[in-house]
Image (cartoon, grey):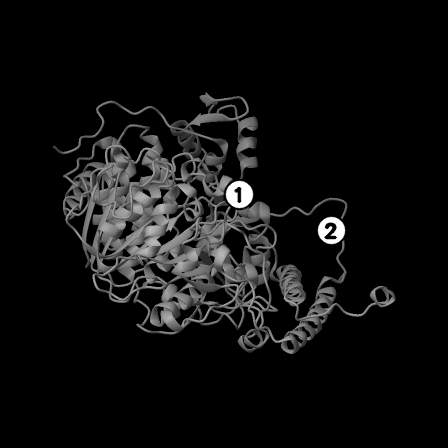
Amino acid sequence: MPQQPPAQPAPSAHVTAAEISRIAGVTRATVSNWRRRHDDFPAPSAGTETSPLYDLPAVQAWLRGRGHTSTASPTEELRTALRLLGPGSGVAARLFPLVAAASRRTPEELAELAAVPDDQMIAQAEKTAAELPAAVPEAEPVRYGPDDASAVRALLGCVREAGAQAAVDVLAERELDEGAASGVYQTPDGLALLMARLLPVGTSRVLDPACGSGTLLAAAARQGAQELYGQDSLPVQGRRTAVRLLLAAPEAETAIRVGDSLRADAFPDVTVDAVLCNPPFADRDWGHDELAYDPRWAYGLPPRFESELAWVQHALAHLEPGGHAVMLLPPALAFRSSGRRIRAELIRSGALRAVVSLPARAAYPLHIGLQIWVFQRPEPGGTDRTTVLFVDGEGEQRDGAAGTPSATDTATAGVGARGGSRPRRSGSSSSAASSSAASSAPASSASAASFDWAGLTDRVLGQWAAFTTAPDTYADEPGVARAVPLVDLLDDVVDVTPARHVRATAADIDPDALARRVHDLHEQLAERVAALAAASASGGWQPSGATAREWRTATVSDLARGGALTVLRAATPGTRGSKGPAAPTGEDRPVLTAQDISAANPPSAGAVDLHADATQSVAAGDVLVRAVAGGGDAAAMTRVADDRDAGALLGPHIHLLRPDPARLDPWFLAGFLGAEDNIASASTGSSLVHVTPGRLRVPLLPLEEQRRYGEAFRRVYELRAAVRRTADLAADTAATLTTGLTAGVLLPPDTPDNRSA
């Protein structure tokens, strides 16, 4: 039966003062002033004295009466419209089919549809949603009532302005809370692409039995998969995945089902080329008793508290002989004694091919360094596998940092990819490793979105390609990877933690080469320290007067409407971008990433990491703003593009502002936009803090005065970059010295103290 709109009006939604500031496009201080100075401002209707809540419709009516038009982003407008309908309305679930159908319309068509009267828009929306293929679970015909008109209109605006995937994510937010409270975490796009690229070229049929938001299946589609199967226990996630795949891979055959994959497998007779999966962690209610005699447990009955080993064997059972499974798993699975026997069987049979450790903060939960396990289903009569590859991906990811040794230096010195040993995390902390995703809150403001996936992907894929091409002759790389014979793993512990097996240093370091390397590092460090001292020298900084300067400001949206600048943004990976032409196939252009902005590096990624529609080029003088805040003072939020950046493609999670140089100085703009208070007032979210560029504010100053400020901000940026480069080089020097001393290839220098001894 078609779903009907709610019969009873939903209770009013409530908003905080911070949310009012986002709706009105003002600061929280302005909202506080309104409360004190205007007697007719709506009184709190819920909450507490210290955390009051306000009736959203009343606030909106007050704002309209004062002439305050909303400057919220399209996604924020959609969130507000959904909240107005109140909990239990069910409208978010009913809007999923409309998103998929609306994505096939041009922006002009969507604008025309949103502009017609409510009754006509509702009728046309129902007709449009009815065109959706049956690939979306529970995508029966829907009905929208008059109360849904505002949500439908906001949805059309969100699809038109922010893309269909952004609208899908907002709808999913409404039905579930992603994060520690619910145990639902989205796999980062960079991690999903890394896992998909670990599959053999030509993989066509892929299954994800815990598909969640569909990130892994979308990544498989980007790598060429044509048949995509997914299952999730949450109906909202099933709908979310189905719509995502319709957007990301419209030509692929998809089958998405809802249900518990372990208890009620929706694809019992399906075998595939590959499985990609980020399964639930530490699930004690996975069905241990009722599934005790299940034929999937070819390597042993999974212990009650080892649900991950049930998911591993479920994945292997769905593979064709020789097929691969790539799974994201908690580090405790590598060493817990309860899983030792099954780990031993996986190793003995040759099913376990590789284990890759990831740094903490690469994926949620952020405080745990997760692992990628690669499996291959044994083939009858196939080649015996004698080794397992271990890759330690937990090293610092600082591509392009000053002081990084060249390939020649590294090879000569023989001390690893960064010229020395580096800090290592054992991965064997039971308290961290055994924590479940459902009970762990993000421990850092740094986000997976700003992680250097390009560097980590190169690190892992290079080792995996060398190992799979010639496993018998694979050469270990100290500090990075090592192929370990099976017999060495089958001890009384069967610990497959990469940090336990990857050697930190080579066994044949050349003492003379390392001594020369240390000398070169010391000379470079002396030059860097001198440059840093020059950059930090006082340059006539003077107080502004007895009090701080005050000036009138304008938002970026105001400046854009006045023609002083243009706001652009790269397409987010996995979403539909602009309708412009896609980048030419095979085009080898560098890509500027958010990490490059933070680290003051030139463009470091390649076009292979981009979504097909991301074609925006960077020009010298453009102002670049990271779309996701976090990372502390060392992580700059803004910078001005220079000649090194010109012509590069704009990577994901970056806003690009192109100022008119006759009206705005770029460095003046970048400096004020990157101020901590400015970023905070224009951001939404908690663990992932997204910056809305239109709400950033800029002082209104004459161009000559802008240039004075711009030159000062440029000097500050160069100081920040010099500090980072000097710190990186100092760390490399210290690591190389430590390696030389502990490996026995360097002697302590003669000093008066040790000569007298």
Q: Mark 1 points at which residue?
A: 681
Q: Residue at x 48, y 71 (%)?
A: 646
Q: As displayed, is residue 391 above or below residue 688?
A: below
Q: Position of residue 271 (x, y in %)?
A: 18, 54
Q: Which of marks 2 and 1 is nearer the N terminus?
A: 2
Q: Is residue 333 left or right of residue 411?
A: left
Q: What residue type is labelled 1?
A: Ser
Mark seen at residue 4: none
Q: Position of residue 419 (x, y in %)?
A: 59, 69
Q: Which of 237 and 82 is in front in this view?
A: 237
Mark 2 secondary-structure assignment: loop
Residue that extends furthest to the right in the rendered view of this protein: 756
Q: Nearer the viewer, residue 416 or 293?
A: 293
Q: Where is residue 753 in the image (x, y as percent from the top left)?
A: 85, 64
Q: As displayed, is residue 355 above or below residue 464?
A: above
Q: Name the residue under label 2.
A: 544
Q: As displayed, is residue 55 above or below residue 500?
A: above
> Could one spot residue 398 in this view of the protein?
yes
